[in-house]
Image (tube, rainbow, N blue to C red):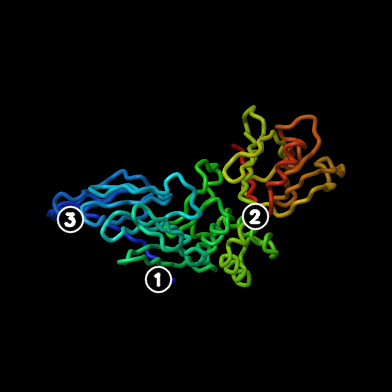
Amino acid sequence: MCVAFLAMVTLTTLLAFLVLTAPVAGAIAPPGPNSALAFGVPEGAAGNSTGLPGPVVAITADAPGAGYWTATANGEVTAEGDAQFYGSMGGRPLNQPVVGMAAVPGGGGYWLVAADGGVFAFGDAQFYGSGTGAPLTAPAVGIAAGKAGYWLAYGQTADPGSPLGQEELLAGLGYLPLRWSPEGFRWLWPAIPSQLASLWQPDRFNTILEGAIDAFEANAGLAMDGQITPAETAALVSAASNPSVAMNPNGYTYALVQEHAGTPAPETLTVWHDGAVVQTTPANTGIPASPTVIGTFPVYLRLRNQVMTGTNPDGAPYADPVQFVSYFYGGDAIHFMPRAAYGYPQSLGCVEIPYGPASVVWNYTTYGTLVTVTTD
C-alpha cells in the first residue's frame, strides 16, 4: 500500500477540543495544561480530563466516538472513556518527539508519528512505512488515517536567515542543549544548570545561539564569528538537508566558573557534557588588580601548549608555559598552570586548574563551548 505524503504544508498549532455530554448552555471553564475538554458529545461518552501525562501533543477518538487517546511528546499514550490502551513509546528513546496521532478506522489500534517522520503502529494498526529522510527544514507535523494506510503532513521551519530558523536547525543538528519540534523547544536533559537556562531566548539572538553558531562554523570550516551571514545560510540549509552527515560531532558542553565572592568556599570550575557533569575542580581566577571577566562567552581559540607573555601589575614581564588552553574572552582562558594550591584568586584573569582536570576539560571545551564566570 502506498503512503501519500502532504508536502510542506504551512505549520500551524492544532488546538483540539474533545467533548463531553450533550451540549450544555453557559460558560465552560478554560482548559489547563495537559487537559481535554468535551463539547457536544453524546451522553455516556468520555468527559473532560485534566492532569493528563504531558506535554500532550495529539488527541484522536476511538471508532465508537465515546472515548479517545492522547499522546505526549515522548510517545506516552493515555486512554480515556471506552478507548482501549494498545501500547506506547513511553520510556523508549526517540530520535525526535511525537507530533501526531491517528486511530485505525473501525478501532483496534493507532499510529504515532514523530517530527522526523518516524511512524509507530500499535494494536491492529498496520505499519505501511515511515517518512524519515526529509530535511530538517520540513518536519513532520501530523498523521491522518485513510480506509487503508495513512497520510503524513510536513510543515516547515522558520526562515533560516532569522534567529528562530537558525535555532530550529541548529537544534536539529545537535548544536543546542534543546530539541526542537513543531511543538516548540524542549531542554534535552532534566538537570540544566540555572546559569545556562537563564541565557535561552527563543526567536532572539542570544548567547546560547552565538555559541552554537561558532561551533557550527568551526565544524563547517567557516570563519568563526558567531553570526550566520547570508552567504553562510546556504551552508546551514545544506547541513540540515543531510543531518545524518552534518550532525555536531562533539556533543554539547557547558563550563561554569564560580568565584564564590565573599565566602570561604574555594573557587571552582564545573564542566557538563551532554547533560552530565564530567569534571569539577578547584580553580584560580584573577586577582583584584587583574580580575577575570564576569559573564558568558564562547570558546574561540584552543591551544595544546603555549607560552603566555605579558606584564604583571607591578610592571615585571612574565613568560609562563601553560597547557590545555581554551580562550573564551580576550586574554582570559581556561588552562593548566602549575601552582602550589588552587581555589582562590591568583591569576591575571585566566582560569587556572590542575594538570589532571585540565587534560580532561580541554577535550570537551571545543569551539563555541560556553564558559560562564560568576561571583555566585
Q: How far apart are marks 1 and 3 (CA)?
A: 31 Å
Q: How far apart are marks 3 and 2 (CA)?
A: 51 Å
Could you tell me if residue 33 is visible in this image?
no
Name the foreground residue: 48 vs 302: 48
Precedes in sequence: disc 1 or disc 2:
1
Precedes in sequence: disc 1 or disc 3:
1
Q: At 81% across and 36% down in the image, what residue appears?
A: 338
Q: Position of residue 189 (x, y in %)?
A: 52, 45
Q: At 52% across and 65% down in the image, what residue appears?
A: 133
Q: At 32% across and 51% down in the image, what residue appears?
A: 70
Q: Position of residue 100 (x, y in %)?
A: 38, 58
Q: Residue at label 2?
A: 249
- For the residue marked with disc 1, what is the amino acid? Ala
Q: Distance between the residues labelled 1 and 2?
A: 34 Å
Q: Residue at label 3?
A: 41
Mark 1, secondary structure of its residue: strand
Mark 3, secondary structure of its residue: loop
Q: Where is residue 188 in the image (x, y as percent from the top left)?
A: 52, 48
Q: Residues within 10 Å of mark 1 (few under 14, many from 20)?
A: few
Q: Residue at label 1?
A: 4
